[in-house]
Amino acid sequence: MSRVLILYGTTDGHTRLIAESIGDALRVGGVDADVVRAGTADPHPAWYDGVIVAASIHAGGYQKTVEHWVRAHACDFGSRPTAFVSACLAVLNQTPKAIADLDQIVTRFCKTTGWKPMQIEHVAGALLYTRYNFIKRWLMKRIVAQQGGETDTSRDYDYTDWVNVRRFAEDFRRRIAAAA
């Protein structure tokens, strides 16, 4: 049985749900998947047949715990299949500038960590107004209003395409099987 590590970083908890969904989809396909939050353990890539790293963009970068783990282990990935899942609401904005900004953030992350993932998957995250403090809620509402998004701060909005997340996991499972 193949074994995959899904290492994730999260700020408000939604990227954890994305990582768990990927893990669940891999398990359904017969893969042993370990979902680990960056900074809580130090799993070694050599223990796995494939590695998926998931992180969310906040203030123009990813969680530092993810960045530190990838930088420490990028040379250990070897030729095993790897993927980077980037969660961000900006994925919903398909303007050339928004796409270029996302690409720049991912490129900076890869350059900083020394990692060149075999696949990069952009996933829309969530707008979790009810979990934000007053300042973050106010700031997010302003940003989202400029884009014509949802501004009712009494509820949360999940923009993740869960079917696509499962499809990504299935594609990764096939890549693991082909590599074996």
Image: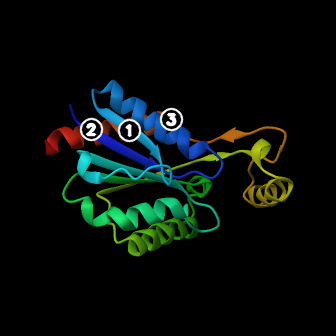
Q: What residue type is labelled 1?
A: Asp
**Figure check: 77 above or below 172:** below
Residue at image x 23%, y 43%? 175
Label 2 sits on residue: 3
Label 1 sits on residue: 34
- Which x, y percent locates residue 172? 30, 42
Residue at image x 47%, y 34%? 21
Crowd band around label 1 with a 10 angstrom C-alpha radius: few (<14), some (14–19), many (20+): many
Q: Which amino acid does label 2 sit on?
A: Arg
Q: Is residue 104 left or right of residue 120?
A: right
Colouring of the image: rainbow
- Which x, y percent locates residue 89? 61, 53
- Mark identifier at residue 162: 3
Q: N-terminal of the two: label 2 or label 3?
A: 2
- Which x, y percent locates residue 57? 57, 60
Callout 2: SS: strand
Q: N-terminal of the two: label 1 or label 3?
A: 1
